[in-house]
Image (tube, rainbow, N blue to C red):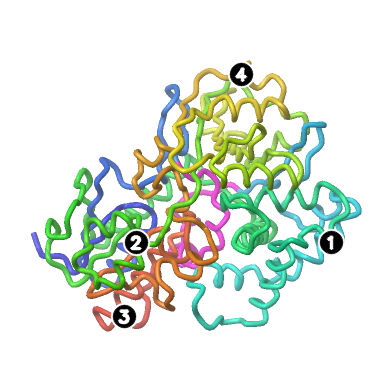
Amino acid sequence: MSTPDVVVVGAGPNGLAAAVTMARAGLDVLVVEGADRPGGAARTEEVTLPGFRHDLGAAVHPMALASPFLRRFGLTDRVPFLVPEVSYAHPFDDGGAAIAWRDLDRTATGLGADGPAYRRLLEPLVDRAREIARFTLGPMVRVPHDPVTVARFGLAVLDQGTPGWNRRWRGRDAPALLTGVMAHTVRPMPSLPSAGAGLALAVQAHAVGWPIPVGGTGAIVDALVQDLLAHGGRVETGRPVARIDELPRARAIVFDTSVPALLGIAGRRLPPVLRAWLRTVRFGAGVGKVDFALDGPVPWLEATARIAVTLHLGGARAAVAEAERTVAARGVPERPYVLVAQPSVLDPTRAPAGKHVLWAYTHLPNGSTLDPTDLISEAIERVAPGFRDLVLASNARSAADIGAWDPNLGGGDLAAGAVTLRQLLARPIPSPDPWHLAGGIYLCSAAAAPGPGVHGQGGYLAARSVLRREFGVVAPPSLR
């Protein structure tokens, strides 16, 4: 077997995106993966009952239609996607709900007195959604391609990421709607990183929607693997790597791993100053997740919530913010924030006829061993009475379980590194090319820019860096 030009360690979406890009450029690419299947957390499996297909990691993909890499790759030509009319819903205990329709005007109309303020905040950004995706899915340390759009986005982040974040709002629904999506960062709020990530997601919700792939997230991984193999790449599973010397000699090694794993495998190949910097990288809070097999649809009190694929639970803005502060202080909130996905309301392939799957997680301290089943079930029951009666089976993972299952998600941190201002500007190093670390060693995982999500951008941009630095290839290859 030939000696590869490049070795990719880890077969998550970013590692596969990097491998596809380099194989398309004509390189001999070998991907090694410790698990018995590629995909990392982006897998779909039957973990409760036969016929119920659950997404083990991400279930809904806000950046799938906006990611520059996935658009170049033509993902929607390879995998059918379904885009719900409701991007996300935020139910309340009194039976009401704030609804983020894909249509911005319809959303604003439903927010009553706060509708005009919501439209003023989001409309200029939605009109420039593609450029905002380009900016937010790249390194933070660089000269922006469209500084005017970036400035507009920055002003919106300041508006919702600082202590005056309630100044424009008069009611409950609009701020809760934004807080629910900002809480995806698992950080105390208000904060600039939470506002930036939340607004970027909200923009795509109204610009293109939050889609789901038919059959589950694993279909995205399958498409990447098929393309890699078609262009001469190789994937070896069941091959954990403890030391860099275990890998074949190659011009470049690209790590789709956490920073601690990178240090453990390649530490001696990195300069001492860089090793010292990387040791300062910290994981954030974790999540506890439960997959439910249900006998029927969830009986949400608010009828519109029954057609939403994504829901945020936790109450008004102040209640969600308080819950996130409790988690940051290593406590467990009595009324936690819960993120719910019910893909089977749109995709009948996920469960047997008449049945449903439900995906849900709540935020917990990093490394928590608490079984989240009761916390999550109680939160759903408050806004969907009778939910518990529908549960046929469930599969729970604590934050500690998630970290043990996928070492990239240390202690259950789905972001593979806390989403702090420092770790956004330096992910993992402060550089316009943060994927290149030293001497043919690169990092492409969620621990590198632009961060978490199934968008492939980290892998694509790392591959571009490899091609340019190691092989003198400046023009990106066609991915179609």
Q: Tag 1: Cα neighbours inside 10 Å, few (<14), some, or many (≥20)?
A: some
Residue at disc 2, secondary structure: loop
Task: Residue 147 in the image: state x and y as whole percent.
Answer: 63, 82
Q: Amino acid at mark 1?
A: Arg
Q: Is residue 68 magenta?
A: yes
Q: Quadrant of the N terminus?
A: bottom left
Give the distance between the C-alpha atoms of the residues marked 2 and 4, in whole angstroms: 46 Å
Give the distance between the C-alpha atoms of the residues marked 3 and 2, in whole angstroms: 28 Å
Residue at disc 3, secondary structure: helix
Which mark, residue 390? Answer: 4
> In this picture, which residue range is highlighted in magenta?
57-82
Q: Residue at x 21, y 47 (%)?
A: 240
Give the distance between the C-alpha atoms of the residues marked 4 and 3, in whole angstroms: 55 Å
Mark 2 and mark 4 residues within 8 Å of each other at the beta carbon: no
Give the distance between the C-alpha atoms of the residues marked 1 and 4, in whole angstroms: 41 Å
Task: Residue 321 in the image: state x and y as whole percent.
Answer: 68, 47
Which one is earlier in the sequence, the residue at label 2 or at label 4?
2
Which mark, residue 168? Answer: 1
